[in-house]
Image: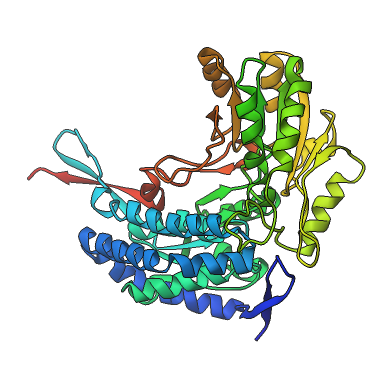
Amino acid sequence: MSVHTVLNPATGQAVRDVASASIDETDAAVDRAVRAQRSWAALAPLERADALRRFSRVVEVHIEELAQLEVLEAGHPIGSARWEAAHVAQVLAYYAGAPERLIGKQIPVAGGLDVTYHEPYGVVGIIVPWNFPMTIAAWGFAPALAAGNAVVLKPAELTPLTAMRLGDLALEAGLPDGVFQVVTGAGSVVGQRFVSHPDVRKVVFTGSTKVGTEVAAGCARELKPVTLELGGKSANIVFEDADLEKAAAAAPGSVFDNAGQDCCARSRLLVQRSVYDRFLELLEPAVAAWRVGDPNDEATEMGPLISAAQRDRVAGYVDGTEVAFRGSVPDGDGFWFAPTVVLAGREDRIVKEEVFGPVVAVLPFDDEADAIALANDTVYGLAGSIWTENLGRGIRVSRAVRSGVLSVNSHSSVRYTTPFGGMKGSGLGRELGPDAAEHFTETKNVFYATP
């Protein structure tokens, strides 16, 4: 049996070895899911709802344990990790209300009664990245389970520990064996088998646009629906009429949170030319104050990058650029990279490609039309922010920027009560929000003829 060694990114030290499943082992998990799903879907909606509420309560009891695992495998600051674990419980509690609200329609027809039903797909395969292992997993498995599906979840090789523990907690909460399984291993083995297996009837993938395109192509060959949440190169647009002090103070959190390993990171900072120099003056002390250090320290705001390879990749983007200023990082072992602000031209590589690290490229713009054109000058369209005191401008620009999730005078991206997803190269479909459980069902139409 092959294994993958999980490393602590803050120290570079080994944490534990985790088994990598083979194709046969993946098939066995799918077979168990097929059998378990039939009885799970047959439960009364209230019973499925109660099961998810129990799951939520069990996760709540284990928030600290899950948070510590997240610190260990992903290097997230402990405060962030606790929020993420609590978020899993909240998402489960929210979608516990869905089984009793999957309501079809009665459509007026002549000669009888026409009714639609929401039927679960059956088995859903969910492929999760390493940047937010717990939260992104929950966005998929909670509504999928609520809709009556069984779930087979593949965590990233670098960060499997929280997913494995959630699998244990699901059983502890009383979910039937086989309804929610975690299969660890390589994407080229386990993830690819989700795509090709005839009994996995829907795939949810979060990751790079390059791999997501391959997943979509494979699912298309199987006529299999897929939800894709992919890369981003989001813009943080600061107009001259904005509260510059507030915008500058908030900017580090928009791009350096999770060490920039966030597809929603506002990694392009677009500042109106008339206030460009003043904004940089305000930004420099905000970056210097951003606390990077031991993830176990309650005061830490940013931990390390996930791996040495990721650190080298990020450094490769910064090499040769004009660095305006940097923050600081600890000395010693671990995959550290200082928060970095670079001054860039519109055609520079660092402006076009997703760095996935704590690096922000700053560019000036002239007017509202120029800001919109520059914000849209990317293959991506996931998130973004607009800073202005002009309500009309906020509405106009938010409608004109081609991104799935935007915020005005804030950097909010994800709420489980609202839909989340991207445009263009940032993905297909939406996660979260009140309709998410329906996205894990097929609509069946039945006509009952009047005798």
Residue under the image location 58 percent in, 73 percent down: 184
Q: Where does the N terminus fall, quadrant-wise?
A: bottom right
* Res. 35 visible in picture: no
Give the x, y percent position of residue 89. 39, 59
Q: Is residue 190 above or below residue 361?
A: below
Residue under the image location 33 percent in, 71 percent down: 175
* Res. 341 visible in picture: yes
Left or right relative to 122: residue 205: right
315 or 138, which is in the foreground? Answer: 315
Left or right relative to 334: residue 387: left
102 or 231, which is in the foreground? Answer: 231
100 or 74, which is in the foreground? Answer: 74
**Farthest left residue?**
451
191 or 164, which is in the foreground? Answer: 164
Residue under the image location 67 percent in, 67 percent down: 188
Number of marks drawn: 0
Q: Is residue 55 above or below residue 92?
A: below
Q: Where does the C terminus fall, quadrant-wise?
A: top left
**Farthest right residue?**
320
Give the x, y percent position of residue 409. 55, 27
Left or right relative to 440: residue 223: right
Give the x, y percent position of residue 286. 69, 37
Protein image colouring: rainbow
Q: Quadrant of residue 289?
A: top right
Give the x, y percent position of residue 143. 39, 54
Q: Is residue 342 above or below residue 103?
A: above
